[in-house]
């Protein structure tokens, strides 16, 4: 294992613990990691945009294929960058209007076709066919059956009626609206549980990385010593953790007299 | 003129893009496809504009040693290093084996990946703590929210699946909750959002919604 790989491993452990140090309190080490994340993230975003959009869609067609039509987006791009100058920033309204209109037009038909019609179509189950394949309720098939089909349709209708604010909510409407609220609550609870489990999986992944469980436990060369990768990772984690704790304590001690005098 | 021309462009471009739905001819598709490509290029340009703005905001603070100048310097230096390595490595930037040297892939693997994963993992603690404080079985709605969340979390882990007798039924109920009532509510929200997107799109194209053009 060369020096660069060891540095990378040590750095990833440090950055993981630096972000997790926010659980204790907002501190300079967390802020350092946060700003590093922003800088690297924006840099990666810019590079991927350059190689994913600018190069194949603008630069190559202009310079290599000599495609004259590509002059128009270049011109619009120049107008967009006029936004950074105070004097000519009004010119940027033209490309902004173009972007907004293009995506509004696509969204308008796309949403109507893809979301609205498809969602309505998918929410009309064939109850006869459901009864023939799964009966009323099939435990072996994830609870599929007529009951599930009816809950889906009635739940959807109740939720839609709950959001129908322009209708007067009289007694029958209130009952339907309450069913809608209950369906929404079930959905929000399930989504919350699902999100928590996703985040916990990520936390487990980071814990595995800190304990060296994410890579094969091979023998690695550390200077003149040969140690198992897992052992080396765990020592690095402990060392980095101690370093972060000592650094936070030292920084707090240094700032404490300043704050007391002010 | 400052607003009239952009409003006119919005209308013309919007009508052309909507027209694709009603005119299924390949020439028309080619025109709208080209315009959409221009839109994608401009949206990417807007990202670069954000980058320029970021530098404009942070660089003077670093030069004048203003508040938190050190953190802002970290941001700008890491940004500059990532950009330099990205352009230096070119198309091979994410190729396997590139992490053996100090490269864009090395930064991606050892800096960006642990930072982004930990940032999202950090949310697990805050979501769980917020849930603990917010989830009180005060009424039927809150109880249902609590039960659904507990069911999904409990049945997703091996300890929940392994409960004698009811374990397998818990998993079926969890899948059913995610597939049926969850889908019903999500579809209702999607239908509502689609109706909202359609009406907003129409307002933009017709020039009734002008907030994207800024003030006078």
Image (cartoon, helix red, strand yellow):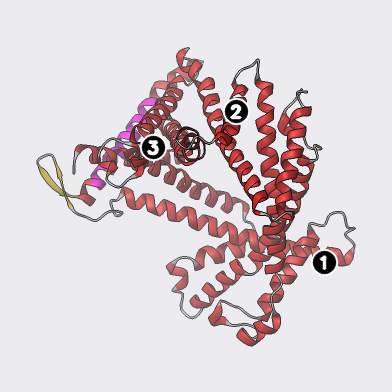
* Horizontal relation, residue B13 to residue B54: left or right: right
Query: Which residue has dot 1 on it?
Result: A175
In the foreground, B92 or A86: B92
Q: Earlier in the sequence, mark 1 or mark 2?
A: 2
Which secondary structure is most common in the magenta stretch? helix
* Horizontal relation, residue A180 to residue B176: left or right: right
**Is disc 2 placed on a helix, strand or loop?**
helix
| Label 3, label 2: how far apart the Cα atoms are | 45 Å
Is residue A42 in view? yes
Chain on which label 3 sits: A
Query: Which residue has dot 3 on it?
Result: A18
The image quadrant of residue B77 is: top left
Considering the image in quadrants, where does the N terminus of chain B appear? top right
Judge the density around disc 3: few (<14), some (14-19), many (≥20) Cα neighbours within 10 Å.
many
Residue B204: give its label: none
Residue at position x 71%, y 54% from top?
B21
| Position above or below: B178 against A32 | below
* Horizontal relation, residue B106 to residue A123: left or right: left
């Amino acid at each position: 294992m060369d020096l660069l790989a060891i540095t990378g491993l040590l750095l990833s452990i440090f950055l993981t613990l630096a972000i997790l140090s926010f659980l204790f309190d907002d501190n300079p080490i967390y802020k350092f990691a946060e700003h590093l994340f922003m800088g690297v993230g924006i840099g990666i975003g810019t590079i991927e945009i350059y190689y994913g959009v600018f190069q194949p869609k603008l630069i190559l067609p202009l310079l290599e294929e000599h495609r004259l039509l590509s002059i128009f987006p270049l011109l619009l791009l120049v107008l967009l960058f006029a936004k950074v100058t105070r004097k000519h920033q009004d010119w940027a309204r033209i490309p902004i209007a173009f972007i907004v209109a293009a995506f509004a037009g696509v969204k308008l038909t796309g949403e109507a076709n893809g979301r609205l019609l498809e969602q309505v179509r998918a929410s009309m189950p064939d109850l006869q066919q459901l009864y023939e394949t799964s009966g009323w309720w099939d435990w072996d098939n994830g609870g599929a059956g007529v009951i599930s089909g009816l809950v889906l349709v009635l739940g959807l209708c109740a939720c839609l009626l709950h959001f129908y604010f322009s209708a007067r909510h009289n007694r029958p409407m209130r009952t339907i609206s309450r069913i809608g609220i209950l369906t929404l609550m079930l959905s929000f609870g399930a989504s919350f549980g699902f999100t928590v489990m996703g985040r916990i999986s990520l936390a487990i992944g980071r814990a595995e990385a800190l304990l060296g469980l994410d890579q094969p436990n091979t023998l690695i060369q550390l200077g003149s010593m040969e140690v198992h990768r897992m052992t080396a990772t765990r020592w690095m984690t402990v060392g980095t953790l101690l370093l972060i704790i000592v650094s936070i304590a030292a920084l707090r001690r240094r700032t404490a007299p300043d704050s007391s005098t002010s | 003129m400052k607003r009239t021309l952009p409003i006119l462009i919005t209308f013309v471009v919007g009508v052309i893009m909507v027209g694709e739905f009603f005119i299924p001819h390949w020439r028309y598709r080619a025109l709208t496809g080209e315009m959409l490509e221009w839109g994608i290029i401009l949206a990417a340009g807007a990202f670069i504009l954000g980058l320029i703005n970021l530098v404009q905001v942070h660089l003077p603070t670093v030069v004048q040693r203003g508040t938190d100048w050190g953190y802002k310097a970290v941001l700008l230096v890491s940004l500059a290093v990532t950009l330099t390595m990205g352009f230096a490595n070119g198309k091979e930037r994410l190729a396997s084996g590139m992490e053996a040297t100090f490269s864009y892939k090395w930064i991606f693997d050892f800096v960006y990946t642990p930072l982004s994963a930990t940032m999202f993992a950090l949310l697990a603690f805050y979501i769980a703590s917020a849930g603990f404080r917010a989830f009180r079985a005060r009424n039927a709605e809150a109880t249902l929210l609590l039960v659904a969340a507990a069911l999904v979390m409990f049945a997703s882990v091996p300890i929940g699946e392994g409960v004698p007798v009811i374990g397998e039924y818990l998993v079926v109920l969890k899948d059913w909750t995610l597939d049926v009532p969850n889908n019903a509510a999500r579809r209702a929200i999607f239908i509502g959002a689609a109706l909202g997107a359609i009406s907003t799109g129409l307002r933009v194209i017709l020039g009734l919604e002008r907030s994207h053009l800024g003030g006078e």
